[in-house]
Image (spheres, helix red, strand yellow):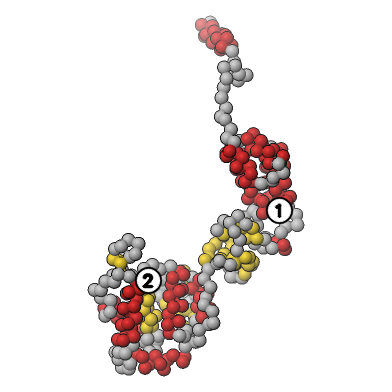
Amino acid sequence: MVRDPHSGKYRRTRLFVLTLGYSRKSVRLLVFRSSSQVWAELHEKAFRRLTGVTRVVVLDNLREGVLTPDIYDPTLNPLYRDVLRHYGAVPLPCRVADPDRKGKVESGVGHAQKTPLKGLRFESLEEAQTYLDHWEARWADTRIHGTTKRQVAVMFAEEKPALLPLPVEPFRYYQYGERTVHLDGCVEVEAAYYGAPPGWIGRHVQVQWDLRQVRLMNPETGQLLREHLRQVRGGHRIKDEDRPKHTPLGTLALLCRADKAGSQIGALCRGMHGEHGETMVRRIQGVLSLAKKYGAASVEEACAAALEMGVCDYRFVRRYLERHPQMPLSLRQVDPLIRQLTLYRDFIENKTKENEI
């Protein structure tokens, strides 16, 4: 039990245990929460504590490591798979509901729960980890293992040369997800837009991104489709070979809708498209959405003001409408829509006479 710094209450931690198959040398790490990245980082920390990498990692089918359990063809978490590939280790998930396959690590978990951590409370996660590391070095590594009948530290010294060397650089972590290629040929990642190859509009792609790059991949084969540098919010990144030579039919239909909404609206939208190309498709859609919200007449007036100032920009039109709200329609005492009361009187009298006859 460790005190949570956010709530101030004691709570149970999660225990990560990696055990070497020959020597039974274990690395035990404590965390509050688990995720795909935390799970991969724990493996990386364990390898660095061992100063080497195991050739095979036998794991159970938890979601952070295995997306679809299958003894013959499992689907691994992409981030976890790439971390192990970076270190040169091969993942080997167990059969579902077969804990005996990894009994060495299961006994290591129980060993830690019953021996150093049972009934203890710590004020911080760092304090608990320091206590666990001290126990690992002074007691767990120096004990005579019940199965091998030899000291764990001595057997680890024999096993250590068989570990793979650590890579020079640590793994560069990324986020991942699935995106749909929209009408402008781009996918959206954190409010920025990145171009996909021709022919992918309307299809799904796998996306990986970090602080530097965004990678688009084929979801079926894993093939890298495009790699872009990260852009600021609202920015676009499209390779020159991916820009269409002719305006796509979907964009032409969108421009026709803008022309029907109003002459000034159509002129503004065509000006945006002519200046910036397919990257303006979303903003053209934004102008048409403003016409639904504020009315075509109001947007027509805003687009006319933008064209007069030489600014073909969606943001200008939106801010103009926000700062110049249109007054709602009101009927006056004398208005063409209001008929004279004598007409209503005569109509009622005629209807009444017809009923009497």
- Residue 292, image x and y in percent? 59, 39
Give the quarter of the image for residue 328.
top right
- Which numbered marker is on residue 277? 1
266 versus 35 height, above or below: above
Q: Dot 2: within a 10 Å radius of its alpha carbon, few (fewer than 14), some, or many (20 or more) residues?
A: some
Quadrant placement of the N terminus: bottom left
Residue at horizontal 33 percent and vertical 92 percent from the top:
151
What residue sits 57% from the left and 22% below the top? 331
Amino acid type, callout 1 = Gly
Query: Is 197 situated left or right of 84 in this image?
Result: right
Relative image position of residue 311 (x, y in whole percent): 69, 45
Does the image show residue 40?
yes
Residue 190 place in picture, x, y as percent: 55, 58
Snapshot quadrant of residue 222: bottom right
Closer to the camera in the image, 245 or 264: 264
**What residue lies at 56% left-to-right and 24% top-to-bottom?**
330
Q: Is residue 327 left or right of residue 146?
A: right
Q: Residues within 10 Å of mark 1 (few under 14, many from 20)?
A: some
Badge 2 amino acid: Val
Mark 2 / mark 1, whichever is N-terminal:
2
* Residue at 72 percent of width and 39 percent of height: 308
| The label number, if any, that marks residue 31 in the structure image | 2
